[in-house]
Amino acid sequence: MLLGELYNPNDNALVSERHNARLLFQKINILGENEQKERKKLFYDLFGKIGKGFYIEPPFYCDYGYNIKLGNQVFMNFNCCILDVMEVNIGHRVMLGPNVQIYTATHPLEAKARASWLEFAKPITIGNDVWIGGAAIICPGVTIGNGTVIGAGSVVTENIPDNVFAAGNPARVIKIIDQN
């Protein structure tokens, strides 16, 4: 799975790992505002790595959790979903709007291969100082460059360079962001 090869998602070990992740994020999602300390502790249990100063609004959803690595000062708004079959690396000072979806999991294009129920994944990297607008979808294998802004509702299917505003379906560079 972590090599990007076809794998069986119904493997007993993987089913158990997803079950454990669900138990953690379900606890996270029901904790009240007065229980933020406990919520943060559970995120440390769920994720592979977390930097300083993160804040995640519940509800939050993921597949495994341990493949998610956050830099410092990451903010995720309500209802983010990360299908972390493969590593998802999120840099420092990244903001995700509500309903952002990050998908490393994918399936074969050929119907016969897809009918086998085997799947595979591609890693996702989000650079430093990135803002991803609400309801954007980040597809498998994508890298988003440092300082970039992704417009709300965009579907990012290909790599996006540093310091640009990209939007649309599929997302395309709309303009370069002046760094002065």
Image (cartoon, grey):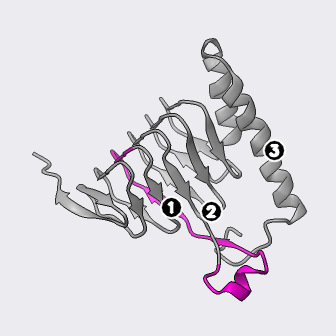
Give the secondary structure at mark 3.
helix
Identify the residue under disc 1. Answer: 124
- Amino acid type, callout 1: Ile
Q: Position of residue 59 (x, y in %)?
A: 61, 34
- Asked whether 68 falls inside the magenta stretch, the response is no
Task: Give whichever of discs 3 and 1 has the lower sequence position.
Answer: 3
- Amino acid type, callout 2: Met
Frontmost residue, 88 versus 48: 88
Position of residue 148 in the picture relative to residue 159 (left or right): left
Identify the residue under disc 3. Answer: 20
Give the secondary structure at mark 1.
strand
Give the secondary structure at mark 2.
loop
Name the quadrant containing residue 103.
bottom right
Q: Position of residue 153 (x, y in %)?
A: 39, 51
Frontmost residue, 150 versus 161: 150
Name the quadrant containing residue 107.
bottom right
Task: Give whichever of discs 1 and 2 has the lower sequence position.
Answer: 2
- Give the Cα separation between the discs numbered 2 and 3: 17 Å
The range drawn in magenta is 108-133
10 Å crowding of disc 2: few (<14), some (14-19), many (20+): many
10 Å crowding of disc 1: few (<14), some (14-19), many (20+): many
Q: Position of residue 128 (x, y in %)?
A: 36, 48
Frontmost residue, 130 versus 154: 154
Identify the residue under disc 2. Answer: 86
10 Å crowding of disc 3: few (<14), some (14-19), many (20+): some
Image quadrant containing the C terminus: top left
Frontmost residue, 79 versus 6: 79
Tally the marks: 3
In contact (CB < 8 Å): disc 1 and disc 2: yes
